[in-house]
Image (spheres, rainbow, N blue to C red):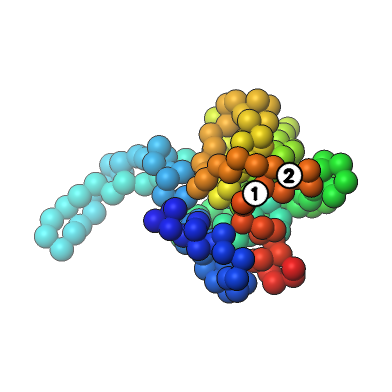
Amino acid sequence: MVAYKLSQLRDKSQSSKAVRELIGDLSTLLAYEATTDISLSTNDQTAQTPRGNYYPVQVKNKIGLVPVLRSGLGLIQGFLTMFPDAPVYHLGIYREKLSHQPVEYYNKLPQTPNVDLCFVLDPIVATGNTAVATVNLLKEWGLRGSQIKFVAIVASKQGIEHLQQEHPDVCIHLAAIDDTLDTHGYINPGIGDSGDRLWNTA
């Protein structure tokens, strides 16, 4: 299903509405994959089913969501469905067009970490510079690499290698890795500018 939804998303003729729905679907599928090793705890007190008692299972750790503005907002819904009470910490980072270097313009992290695990949400890892900068911010905030999971739809080989080289302790979840990164820092075939496609600003 991931390959099917991604194939539809790559089609440049899709409307912004369709793009939002497809990225939302992919976020649900990626959320499932990224949470297979989440720590659970069993309640000491029993609860009742229609036919008997059972011990409820709960998520052990406090989860935080970190969408990278603006395209990261497209990946939020699948994770909020999984963790409806999770705090959402928005980070605004854009890639400067000429240097391809990340520029931070918005940071909604609280003063000190109050979560055990953060999911960073950004549909594309192209050069990897924005991904590295985002993880840098979270580590400077006080998280360890083992407390960070990076979730994206498409990454270039170069971008993912850059992120892994700088932060080998961070777990990465992707729908696909594309081979080519052009001279402008765009992935080919990729999915285009996810922010423009999501919010109809192309």
In front of the other: 10 or 173: 10
> Are the residues tagged 1 and 2 within 8 Å (C-beta)?
yes
In front of the other: 180 or 40: 180
Q: Dot 1 corresponds to which residue? A: 188
- Where residue 175 appears, as percent x and y from the top left, is 50, 47
Inter-mark Cα distance, 1 to 2 = 7 Å
The amino acid type found where label 2 is placed reads Asp
- Where residue 45 appears, as percent x and y from the top left, is 27, 46
Placement of the N terminus among the 4 image quadrants: bottom left
The amino acid type found where label 1 is placed reads Asn
- Where residue 62 appears, as percent x and y from the top left, is 51, 44
What secondary structure is marked by label 2? loop
Residue drawn at (76%, 52%) of the image:
92
Q: Earlier in the sequence, mark 1 or mark 2?
A: 2
In front of the other: 136 or 193: 193
Placement of the C terminus among the 4 image quadrants: bottom right
- With respect to residue 185, does 69 lie above or below? below
Label number found at residue 111: none
- With respect to residue 35, does 202 lie above or below? below
Q: Dot 2 corresponds to which residue? A: 182
- With respect to residue 147, does 174 lie above or below? below
Q: Badge 1: few (under 14), some or many (20 or more) residues near its Cα, within 10 Å? A: some
Quadrant housing residue 130: top right
What secondary structure is marked by label 1? strand
